[in-house]
Amino acid sequence: LGHLGLAITMAGATVVSNYGIERDVRMVPGDVATVGDYHFVFRDIGARQGANFTAQYGTFDVMLDGERVSVLHPEKRQYSVGMSVMTEADIDAGLFRDIFVAIGERITDEAWAIRLQYKPLVRWLWLGSLFMAAGGFLAIADRRYRIREGADTKVQTDTVAPEPGSATSAGVTS
């Protein structure tokens, strides 16, 4: 089971590193960008107020073969404490691929820097790790691999300590 997990992890890492696609594009609402076979339609940008932040969020339709497979809503948040700015990406996760959209900086009044990513088999990295952990726990639970108490100690046979005045190991008597 552990070896299967290692194989799954290696397959995921190989496919992600060789076939993953990342694009940084400039988009305005209404634009379409293509990453692999997926088309990302930037529908609009809006604003919302959170408990301790204000956010600008985008709405993206993800299309494959003319059909919508997901709607993603990434955000650019500005927190009131410390005035820090954070990007909250939105991910459409699946067993065979992840699709990732993040909003970057505002370029003009309408245009934004957008990061689009397609990551095939990225979830296999975690799945393989779970298989390896399960294999390790099964190995720990296997009774054949437990050390039995007293199994490795040698039993002493008929060895008696010599009495004073008797023959010693050199054969000399006192």
Image (cartoon, helix red, strand yellow):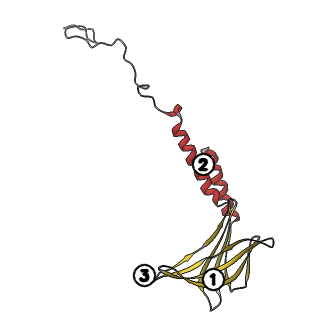
SS at circle 1 = strand
Asked if the residues shown at circle 1 and circle 3 are in contact, with their CB atoms under 8 angstroms apart, the answer is: no
Q: Residues within 10 Å of mark 1 (few under 14, many from 20)?
A: some
Q: Earlier in the sequence, mark 1 or mark 3?
A: 3
**Amino acid type, residue under disc 2 in the picture:** Phe
- Please state, as top left, top right, bottom left or bottom right, where the C terminus lies in the image: top left
Residue with the mark numbered 2: 131
SS at circle 2 = helix
Q: Nearer the viewer, residue 19 or 81?
A: 81
**Amino acid type, residue under disc 1 in the picture:** Ala
Compared across the picture, whether 155 is left or right of 36 comes to: left
Give above or below for 130 relative to 33.
Answer: above
Q: Nearer the viewer, residue 147 or 41?
A: 41
Q: Earlier in the sequence, mark 2 or mark 1?
A: 1
Residue with the mark numbered 3: 82
In percent of width and height, residue 45 lies at 64, 84
In percent of width and height, residue 142 lies at 54, 35
Label number found at residue 155 = none
Give above or below for 115 relative to 128.
Answer: below
Q: Residue at x 61, y 76 (%)?
A: 74
In percent of width and height, residue 9 lies at 63, 54
Q: Residue at x 65, y 50 (%)?
A: 7
Q: Residues within 10 Å of mark 3 (few under 14, many from 20)?
A: few
SS at circle 3 = loop
Asked if the residues shown at circle 3 and circle 2 are in contact, with their CB atoms under 8 angstroms apart, the answer is: no
In percent of width and height, residue 151 lies at 44, 25
Count the labels in the image: 3
Q: Nearer the viewer, residue 123 or 173?
A: 123
Compared across the picture, whether 165 is left or right of 87 comes to: left
Residue with the mark numbered 1: 113
